[in-house]
Amino acid sequence: MASLGVLCTMLVVCRVLPFAPGPQGSHSISFSWLGMLAALGFACMLLASVLVIPFALFRALIGTGLQRRYWLYSAAAAGLPVLIIVVGAIHRVTGAVRETMIERLGDRASPLISAIETFDLDNGSPPSALTDLVPKYIDELPQTRMMGYARYDYERFPIDKRKHELVWYDLGPSDHRRSGSPETYPDGDPGHAILVLILGAEERVSDIIVDRLPQEHALKQFEREAWQSGQGRIAMAPDLMNSVIWRGMSLTDIWTVLGSPSGRRLLSPRWELLVKGAEDFLSGRSIDKLMFRPNGHYPESGFGLRVSRFKDWAYVVMPD
C-alpha cells in the first residue's frame, strides 16, 4: 500500500505540478463530475482493500507453506484492481485539472494577445518582439503564473505573398456522389460545396477552386443577383470560373461581383505565442509547449507529435 501511495503521488506531481500557479498568484481547482465519479469508485475500491487485504495478510501471517503463499497471492490480487482504478482515476482527475489550468492561462494571456493584434492593425505587421508592445500597447508583459511554464515566447513568421488568405462562398448542398477530386478545404458545412478564392498579401486573387462539387449537377449561366441571393450557386459555379478573369482581382471587386463571403481566414499564421515547458537534458530543446495562433490552425498529431486543443490554445508534446 505504501508503494501504491508513492506511485499515485508521483503521478499527481508529474501531471499537475508544472501547471500549478507560481509565486505570482494562486487559484482554486474545480473538478468535473467525471472526476467526482472516479473519486467515488476509488473510495469503494479502497474500502474493499481495507477489508480484504488486511484479512489476507493476517491469514498469510498465521499460515504456513502453500497456505501462506496462497494468502499472499490473494492480497496481491486484491490490490491490483485497486492500483489500476486509482491510477486511472488520478489520470482523469489530473487531466481535468491540467485542462482548467491551461484554459485559465489563455484568459490571463488575453491582454497580451489583444496588444499584439492591435499592434498588427496599427502598423501593418506584427511586432518583432514582445518588448515592442511596452508601454504603448500594454503597460508590462504579463507573467504566465505557471511553475513549469515560466515565460511567454513569441515568433513572427514571414508572409507568404501568394497564399496569404482564403475567402470562401457556400454553394449549397452537395450530395454523396462527389467529383473525383478529394476534399481540399475543411471550411463551411462538410455537406455543402464551396467556392474558394486564395488571396495574396495585397488582397488580390492568386487562385480559385470549387471544392466538394457534386459529380452530377445542372449548369446555369452566372447571374449576379441570383448568386448574391444564394440561389443556384452550384449550377453557376463552372460558368462563373470561366466567364470572369479572377487572377489579380482585388477583394473589393470580388465583393462587388459575389457579395460578402460566407467566411474568410488566414492560411498561415502571422505570429504565434508560445509558453515552453521543460527542456530535454541532452538536446536542450523543449519537450512540450503551449501554443496560440491567431488563425486557429495548429499542427496535427502524427509521427510522434501529440497535439491537444484547449479552446483557442494547443498543447504540443514534441516527438522523442
Image (cartoon, rainbow, N blue to C red):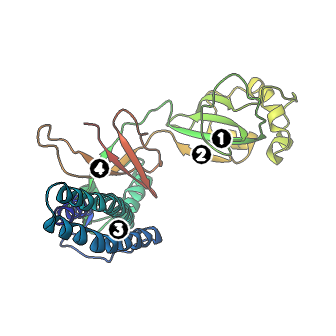
Q: Quadrant of the N terminus?
A: bottom left
In this view of the protein, which residue sits in the foreground, 137 or 236?
A: 236
Alpha carbon distance from label 3 to label 1: 33 Å
In this view of the protein, which residue sits in the foreground, 71 or 20?
A: 71
Mark closer to the chain start, 3 or 4: 3
Amino acid type at image mark 3: Arg
Alpha carbon distance from label 4 to label 1: 32 Å
Location of mark 2 (residue): 264
Query: Where's residue 188, x and y in %?
Result: 65, 45
Location of mark 4 (residue): 289
Tell me the quarter of the picture where residue 19 sits.
Answer: bottom left
Amino acid type at image mark 4: Lys
Task: Look at discs 2 and 4 and give the one toward the viewer.
Answer: 4
The answer to whether residue 150 shows anywhere in this view is no
Amino acid type at image mark 1: Trp
Task: Look at discs 3 and 4 and give the one toward the viewer.
Answer: 4
Q: Are marks 1 and 2 in contact (CB under 8 Å)?
A: yes
